[in-house]
Amino acid sequence: MVSMSRSYFDEIYRTDPDPWQFESSWYEQRKYALTMASLPGRRYRSAFEPGCSIGVLSSLLAQRCDQLLATDIVPDALNRARQRCRESTGVRVEARAIPEDWPTGPFDLVVLSEIAYYFDRPTLYQIMTRVLATSTSTATVVAVHWRGSTNYPLSGDEAHEIIGSQAELQSTVHHVEPDFLLDVWTRRPLGPGVKPKV
Ligand SMILES: C[S@@+](CC[C@H](N)C(=O)[O-])C[C@H]1O[C@@H](n2cnc3c(N)ncnc32)[C@H](O)[C@@H]1O
């Protein structure tokens, strides 16, 4: 199993509490707005966001989810996520590393936002096995990743190709920009006459 180390992320947060400018960048705000607008359900019962960082996307997801489990591996980021989501009911912020500490679910929404490219191919396939094992038969799976060059094990495009290769997932949104990919899949096909549940 190859994934970026805990010390790599500890070091990133040590020098900057918001290293990707999630709170302030227009790029991130617009990407979050597109992500939220792409979710087919009005509401979700139980969502999982691994790699939640300081909880900016988590706080938006919390508005559409009865329960949200947001996890990360860096204690300082988790503290900020807890603080940001303190008034959102139904949000749990926990220290958990994926894939090993994958929660039991069941989830009707799994959000892989800027996390899947930190793993090598076999590990991302393992993560997808866990996504499918812990999600409901009507679940939505979302992936959003930057497409630039990095020192990560996978590119954003490679990560989406692996996630989308799961036979159980049907593509409902495939949004391509020069800088990022946004994909939404459902486990049950949505088509004309098949409305998502609220
Ligand atoms: C780029 S941030 C993504 C934040 C958030 N999902 C968003 O899109 O706004 C990636 C986060 O993943 C966390 N992370 C990295 N490897 C992880 C792992 N194995 N398990 C859980 N979280 C991890 C990092 O600590 C970091 O906070």
Image (cartoon, rainbow, N blue to C red):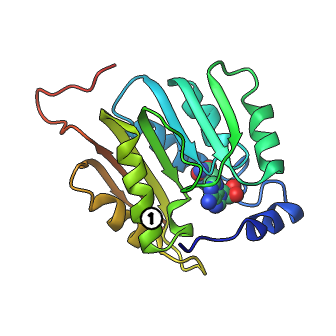
Asked whether, in this view, residue 48 is left or right of residue 22, the answer is left
Task: Report the front residue among 87 and 74.
Answer: 74
Residue drawn at 35 percent across, 46 percent down: 132
Residue 9 position within the rendered picture, expressed as x and y whole percent measured from the top left = 74, 65
Residue 38 position within the rendered picture, expressed as x and y whole percent measured from the top left = 38, 40
Q: Secondary structure at mark 1?
A: helix
Residue 87 position within the rendered picture, expressed as x and y whole percent measured from the top left = 73, 20
| Residue placed under numbered mark 1 in the picture | 124
Tell me, yes or no, if residue 198 can be seen here.
yes
Q: Quadrant of residue 43?
A: top left
What is the three-letter code of the residue carrying label 1? Leu
Q: Quadrant of ligand 1?
A: bottom right
Q: In which quadrant is the C terminus drawn? A: top left
Q: Quadrant of residue 196?
A: top left
Tell me, yes or no, if residue 178 can be seen here.
no
Asked whether, in this view, residue 175 is left or right of residue 150, the answer is left
Residue drawn at 42 percent across, 71 percent down: 122
Asked whether, in this view, residue 164 is left or right of residue 5, the answer is left
Determine crowd level at label 1: few under 14, some 14-19, many 20+ residues with C-alpha closer than 10 A. many
- Where is 184 relative to 146, above or below? above
